Image (tube, rainbow, N blue to C red):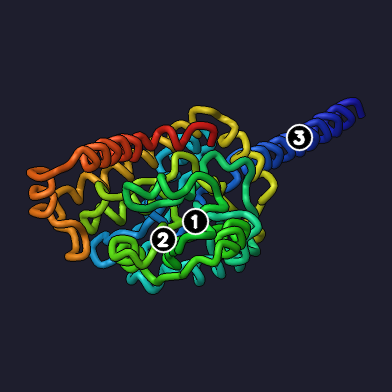
Amino acid sequence: MGKIFFKIIVLFLALFLSNQARCADSNNSMVQREEFLGDKLTVVGLPDFLPFSQYVKDGSRMQLHNVFWQPLQKALQKYRLKLYAPLFISMDECDYVPLIVGMREGKYHLFLGAYSDTKKFSGIVPIYPAVISNPIHIIGLAEMPDKVKEIKDLQKLHGVVCDCEYFSDFAMRKINDLKVEHVATAYDAYEKLFTGKADYLIGSWYYNRIMSSQYGLERYLSASKKPLFKIPVFMSMSKLTPKLSEYIKMFQKILADPQFSTDIKNEILREVETQVQKNIGVVPPSFAPQEQDAVSKEEDETSEEVEIKGRVIEQQTQQKSIEEVLEGI
């Protein structure tokens, strides 16, 4: 009888320990899933949002290049998460409208470079805080700052804004209050400036440094010392992302790291300077001042022209110091 009782005790003990082991394995699996969340995040961004993001050719496909990319990859290493950017066969496929629709449907998880409270980005969740901003300036020819001392001076002048740029809805309402003319491309805006059909352009200083350099015009332009707006640029997530709240908590920790903000700003500066340096030597369009004209003026310059020349040099020095624009962002 004692032997039978002993065997029953051993059997129950074995069953108890086996059940505990299964519970431990289950708990460990749950912890692992919570810790790692998922293997990868599918990431997209605006196709032509220089210098923040662009899609470039990778063989026959389009690949996302984004200033968030490298700093994010570095920050996500400790979470064992990887970013995955889908390759698109053509630029038409990575137009921002289907990308936003894909975010709303949960096809993509993370969107790099969106504005908050802006209709085109509705339906996706911005992650706070935004560590960078897009500075929007008054841009014109070198003498433009003499005409503009305060915002009300702009109402006496003719301004243009390019529909190829991205603005928040708030900034766009304020810009339209100035009764500016909308043009299709940056080239159209520059042509109006140089031919006297417009007095100023409202646009991102980053974007216009790059675009004006592509047309050989950067050295002729200057910007207001302070931006009209600093539009916060967000990372955003699809509402249908599994474990959305956990991902947002994780990204908020990353965004709170001052080094992450510094890395992003350095990426922006690097991208702007890379693009500008690549375009050195580009011949300007015919509507720009010709080099021969500049030589003739130097041979016969008056004291007034010497003063103007000095002011141009000052403005050129200012436009190179874009680190100043980043202060306080």
In the rendered image, which quarter is residue 74 located in? top left
Residue matched to label 1: 42
- Say whether residue 103 is visible: no
Residue matched to label 2: 86
Give the residue type at disc 3: Gln
Image-based side of 320 in relation to 4, left or right: left
Q: Secondary structure at mark 1?
A: strand
Of pointers 2 and 1, the one earlier in the residue sequence: 1
Q: Position of residue 22 (x, y in %)?
A: 71, 40
Q: Residue at x 29, y 61 (%)?
A: 194
In the rendered image, which quarter is residue 128 located in? top right
> Could you say which disc has been placed on residue 20 in the image?
3
Q: Nearer the viewer, residue 47 or 176?
A: 176
Q: Residue at x 57, y 55 (%)?
A: 115
- Say whether residue 279 is visible: yes
Q: Residue at x 49, y 40 (%)?
A: 226
